[in-house]
Amino acid sequence: MSPEGTISKNGKCPKCGKKVTEGVLHRASVLADRKRGFKPKKSFGFESIIPLAEIIAGIHSCGVNTKKVTREYMELLEKFGSELYILRQCPSADLKQAGFEKLSHSLERMRTGQVSVTEGYDGEFGVIDVVNRPHSQLNPLS
């Protein structure tokens, strides 16, 4: 749950009623001296990027360490250069022309922040998905 959700439920799990484990984000919101999303006027920008292997794995619905992902990852590096170039700058048309249409679509979604985010909890990692329909938005790349 978000810190606001935890507070609204009085720190209790809506499913089982037990006390929830408050995470780092909750602690940060308690200590914060400004509202969530506040951006100072002279602040530097940042980019939210997802590792290329994770995007490929999401497209194929398989693990990151599979041969299929490794093979496609290496093929992309050979054709287009560095991972950061592919993630940040490689034109969609070039990817489509080389037969990577789903990757092109996924990268466009990542670059514009149109991703699905399922937050982690109690030792479970969160999941970021650029393949399926988004239900939250990260900051787009600048």
Image (cartoon, rainbow, N blue to C red):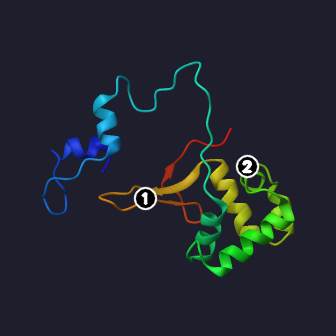
Q: Is residue 3 above or below residue 116?
A: above
Quarter of the rendering occupied by the C terminus: top right
Of residues 124 and 98, the one nearer the viewer is 124
Q: Mark 1 and mark 2: span between their CA atoms?
A: 23 Å
> Which amino acid type corresponds to the residue marked 2 in the rendered image?
Arg
Q: Residue at x 73, y 73 (%)?
A: 72
Above or below, 75 relative to 86: below
Q: Earlier in the sequence, mark 1 or mark 2?
A: 2
Query: Front-most of 29 and 102?
Result: 29
| Residue extending furthest toward the bottom | 67
Graded by Cα atoms within 10 Å as few (under 14), some (14 to 19) or many (20 or more), the crowding at tag 1 reads: few
Query: At numbered mark 2, what does the secondary structure look like: helix, strand or loop?
Result: helix
Residue drawn at 51 percent across, 57 percent down: 116
Please state the horizontal and vertical placement of residue 43, each as a whole percent of the image: 58, 24
> The residue under label 1 is which amino acid type?
Gly
Residue 101: image location, x then y, percent? 76, 68
Relative horizontal placement of residue 93, taking residue 39 as reference (left or right): right
Instruction: Check if mark 1's residue and mark 2's residue have beta carbons within 8 Å.
Output: no
Instruction: From the top left corner, tell me how far across and down residue 35 is, in percent.
Output: 38, 27
132 w.r.t. 4: above or below: below
Q: In x, y percent, where is residue 53?
A: 64, 66
**For residue 19, which numbered disc appears in the image?**
none
Element assignment for label 1: loop
Which of 136/29 is in front? 29
Q: Quadrant of residue 92?
A: bottom right
Q: Circle 2: is it few (<14), some (14-19), or many (20+) Cα within 10 Å?
A: some
- Residue pointed to by mark 1: 126
Location of mark 2 (residue):
88
Decide if residue 44 is on the left or right side of residue 78.
Answer: left
**Residue 36 image-quadrant placement:** top left
